[in-house]
Amino acid sequence: MNNLLTRLGIPLEVQAFFNATPDLSFSYGDQYERYGEGFHIVPSTTNLWFAGTQHATDLIITYSAMEAIAFITLNRHRYPRLEQLAFVAIGNRLHPGQGEWIGQHFPCRKVILAFGKDLVGHLTDIKLTSAIKNIPVRILHRDAEIHIYRNSRLRVFHQEQVSLHAFQESFGIRPRFRTAKSVRSLTFLDQLKYESER
């Protein structure tokens, strides 16, 4: 049991599933994510953090281990069997090789992308889906528009309207990965912190 996680409202079974260490450090292989009172350090690395089993039916991908913990805490009622879940965190910045690794090691899984509900989160949804499915895309941000190129095809989105769903519909792409966004905050971890302080 970790006192900080308990104060955030994270159940003991969730803490045990993620093997939460007393110092709340999560290994990405070459670097660590660290969380504590008043700080959260998330690495930028080509490696990944992983929890669960590769035989899981559902894969949830986030920026950080703490975001994964917050996601399942707030959505526990939707996922009664933790053993069916696997979690991957990509760190602060998506690297193309991360998507390739995920695609190779987790084929034919239900994938939930749990990134922030800001523009960066929506673009990460698109870039990661493209990397996992080996779909070459190029994304440019011009003024208030997002230009997405796939081969010789161009689609232009207003930055308020860009989303994974809009991208998939526009280009006729079907893996139909799902996204999950916090209802009350930018991220699930922000929502969890806010709710624990009330």
Image: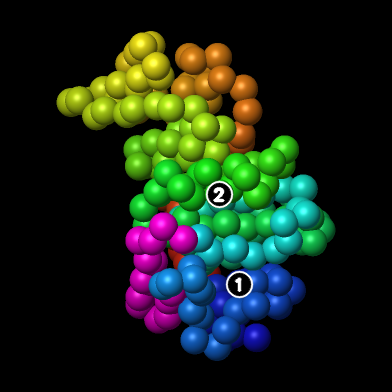
Question: Residue 97: horizontal and vertical position, in percent?
Answer: 46, 48
Examine the rendered structure and indicate whether residue 10 appears above or below residue 137: below
Task: Say which label, 1 or 2, has the lower sequence index.
Answer: 1
Question: Residue 77: horizontal and vertical position, in percent?
Answer: 75, 54
In the image, what residue type sits under mark 1?
A: Gly
**Is residue 36 located in the magenta-colored stretch of the structure?**
yes
Which mark, residue 101?
2
Q: Which residues are drawn in magenta?
A: 32-47
The reply to whether the C-beta atoms of the residues labelled 1 and 2 are less than 8 Å apart is: no
Query: In terms of image quadrants, where is residue 81?
Result: bottom right
Q: Which residue occupies 35% across, 38% down?
A: 119
Question: Residue 14: horizontal and vertical position, in percent?
Answer: 69, 70
Within 10 Å of the Cα at label 2, are there few (<14), some (14-19), or many (20+) other Cα atoms?
Answer: some
Locate the N terminus and report the quarter of the image it occupies.
Answer: bottom right
- Asked if one can make out residue 159 in the rendered structure from this viewpoint, the answer is no
- Out of 66 and 127, give the one closest to the viewer: 127
Classify mark 1: helix, strand or loop: loop
Task: Give the residue pinned by disc 1.
Answer: 9
Examine the rendered structure and indicate whether residue 141 appears above or below residue 57: above
In the rendered structure, the answer to whether residue 124 lies left or right of residue 15 reads left
Q: CA distance from mark 1 to mark 2?
A: 33 Å
Question: Residue 63: horizontal and vertical position, in percent?
Answer: 46, 56
In the rendered structure, the answer to whether residue 96 lies left or right of residue 62 reads left
Within 10 Å of the Cα at label 1, are there few (<14), some (14-19), or many (20+) other Cα atoms?
Answer: some
Which mark, residue 139?
none
Classify mark 2: helix, strand or loop: helix
Q: Which residue occupies 65% across, 72% down?
A: 18
